[in-house]
Image: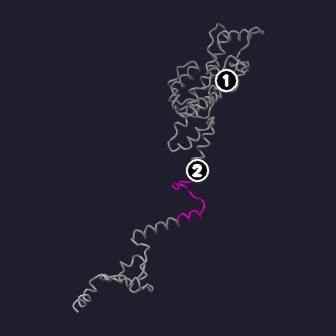
Amino acid sequence: MTEEEHVSMANSHSSNGPAQNLSDDSSSCYYLHPFDNPGALLVSKIFTGENYIAWSRSMSIALTVKNKIAFVDGSLVQPITNDPHLHVAWLRANNLVLSWLMNSIAKEIRGSLLYFTNAFDIWEELKIRYLRSDGPRDEYISYRPIPSCRCGNLNRCSCNILTDLTDRQQSDYVMKFLVGLHDSYSAIRSQLLLQSPLPSMSRVFSLLLQEESQRSLTNAVGISIDSQAMVVEQSSRIVSTSNTQFTKQKGKSDAICSHCGYSGHLVDKCFQLIGYPPGWKGPRGKRFNSTPTAAKNFQRLPTANNTNVLEQNSST
């Protein structure tokens, strides 16, 4: 609000009769409600330096409800006029907003803002200090907001320029968010980037949450399974796998000897044909009747047990 508008407002009130206090006009930004306490806390979470986006958004909503948002967004500047009523009305309303801002700021930060006398100056100082444009999506939105129209002619616009600007900005947000995703989301990121037009940011968040839920279900580490049957089945698989590994570690094979019928060796390694080693305590004899061809075709190898027999045969 410019200086001429301030003067015009003051003149309109004075032309209606006796000078009227602007703080009593409920439609004015200077209006002070009887329950507007300077010690009130308008937001539930105070500003600590790390939550600027959430805090500024909450304060903007609260000040809009109180009809005092003009004191922090720059649309209502301090009037330069000789009218004492207008000056006092602005000073009271500004100090009220100033008190609300200070009450919602942590005492560690509040100490550096004690000497500010304008609510707009404090609001801008906090924005310069704590608004980071390289942060999450909400900070990026506040860093480059859609410009608002103040001339009042936007409602008569027929080209939908504001809608196009909003859609373009939303596409920028989605693109920036997808590019910053971890490489493990490369598959779903490619699918989203191939869509035309790009989905909204809320839709992107929803799809990513679904992807994380599916991954958690297929990941066997750190998942609690409610079904007892699934727990038993999983345990039996582990035991079966362990037994298989143990059998393989023992060096056993699935081969079956065609001479003796025992498993674990072939006919060329059969102890019944090549002789038992000293101290053998295993089974002896055939497990089933073998084919005579295998016994005839197999040549006995000389061992310590049949060396004497071979020497006698050679001497005769």
The residue shown at (64%, 7%) is 82
Q: Nearer the viewer, residue 263 or 128?
A: 263
Could you tell me residue 178's position as x and y percent? Answer: 55, 37
Q: Earlier in the sequence, mark 1 or mark 2?
A: 1
Residue drawn at the location 41% of the way across and 84% of the way down: 293
**Res 13 → quadrant:** top right
Hey, which residue is sitting farthest left in the picture?
315
* Left or right, 42 with reference to 129: right
Tag 1–tag 2 contact (CB < 8 Å): no
x, y percent for residue 158 = 72, 22
Numbered badge on residue 161: 1
Mark 2 residue element: helix
1 over 64 or under it: above or below: above
Q: Which SS class for mark 1? A: helix
Classify residue 196 as left or right of residue 283: right
Q: Is residue 281 left or right of residue 8?
A: left
In this picture, is 260 found above or below 110? below
Give the class, few, some or many, for how many residues have Cα within 10 Å of label 1's Cα (few <14, many ≥20): few
| Residue, disc 2 | 214
Q: CA distance from mark 1 to mark 2?
A: 40 Å
Q: Disc 1 marks which amino acid?
A: Ile
Tell me how many marks there are. 2
Bounds of the magenta span?
Answer: 217-235
Front position among marks 1 and 2 = 1
Which amino acid type corresponds to the residue marked 2 in the rendered image? Gln
Q: Residue at x 62, y 42 (%)?
A: 206
